């Protein structure tokens, strides 16, 4: 990523953030590696700015790789954790960096909800024979007919049930009983 793209990206992200409760802070960010350059992030009187210049009267300076800066801005990387791991260096007033860091809080992904496949498969099985036999008489429950998307998992689940039935049929259940009867 080029220097201009990094600065533009941070400007767009920072413009969307609420900095009204953040105190006055000015942090220069020195990008190392790809996209090398310097820019600053400042908050004054509850208004934020990101400009592509060095800020000589800064409270602190962050020195980091461009990809780490993007990860911090996106909330994927915690600035303090990155500092502790040695991914970024901080010079100056660390408390001011922590104040600015609170604006870029790390976002935690919400846990994905898992649907019970058995519950989805049962209503769809009842639905298919009803449509084939007599849709006007047996399709009265509208709740079962509405979810068309539920039919897809049923088709995927049916082969698994057939395989389970085949496996059950192959098991010799009667042999142990006969041996017990002979004794």
Image (spheres, rainbow, N blue to C red):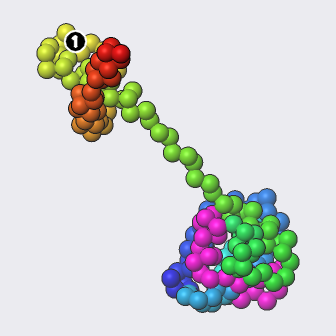
User: Around disc 1, counting alpha carbons within 10 Å, would you say few (fewer than 14), some (14 to 19), or many (20 or more)?
Assistant: some
| Residue 47 coordinates in the image, percent (x, y) | 73, 67
Q: Which residue is mark 1?
A: 138
Q: Quadrant of residue 30?
A: bottom right
Between 40 and 60, which is closer to the camera in this rendering?
60
Residue 169 higher or lower than 57, as above or below: above
Q: Which residue is at 50% across, 40% downward?
A: 113
- Residue 151, x across and y down, in percent: 27, 33
Q: Secondary structure at mark 1?
A: helix
- Numbered marks: total: 1
Viewer-nearest residue: 51 or 157: 157
- Nearest the viewer among 32 and 27 is 32
Q: Residue at x 72, y 69 (%)?
A: 81
Where is residue 126, by image quadrant? top left
- Whether residue 71 appears in magenta in the rendering, the answer is yes
Please tell me which residue is depicted at 83% across the width and 80% down the height of the picture. 59
Is residue 66 in the magenta section?
yes
Chain part drawn in magenta: 54-77
Question: Is 128 on the left or on the right of 113, as rendered?
Answer: left
Q: Residue at x 78, y 81 (%)?
A: 90
Q: Is residue 156 left or right of residue 48?
A: left
- Apparent side of residue 172 relative to residue 59 in the rendered image (left or right): left
Q: Residue furthest front?
A: 183
* 173 on left or right of 73: left
Residue furthest out toward the top: 137
Seen in the picture, residue 130 relative to 90 is either above or below; the reply is above
On the question of residue 173 being in view, the answer is yes
Q: Position of residue 153 (x, y in %)?
A: 30, 37
């Amino acid at each position: 990523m080029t220097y201009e793209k990094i600065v533009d990206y941070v400007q767009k992200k920072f413009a969307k953030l609420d900095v009204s409760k953040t105190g006055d802070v000015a942090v220069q960010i020195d990008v190392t590696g790809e996209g090398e350059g310097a820019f600053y992030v400042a908050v004054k009187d509850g208004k934020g700015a990101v400009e592509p210049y060095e800020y000589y009267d800064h409270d602190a300076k962050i020195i980091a790789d461009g990809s780490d800066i993007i990860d911090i801005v996106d909330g994927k990387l915690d600035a303090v954790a990155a500092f502790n791991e040695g991914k970024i260096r901080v010079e100056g007033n660390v408390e001011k960096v922590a104040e600015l860091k609170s604006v870029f809080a790390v976002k935690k992904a919400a846990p994905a909800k898992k649907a019970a496949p058995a519950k989805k498969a049962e209503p769809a099985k009842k639905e298919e024979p009803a449509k084939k036999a007599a849709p006007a008489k047996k399709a009265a429950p509208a709740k079962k007919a509405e979810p068309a998307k539920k039919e897809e998992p049923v088709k995927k689940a049916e082969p698994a049930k057939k395989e389970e039935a085949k496996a059950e049929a192959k098991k010799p259940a009667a042999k142990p009983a006969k041996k017990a009867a002979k004794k």
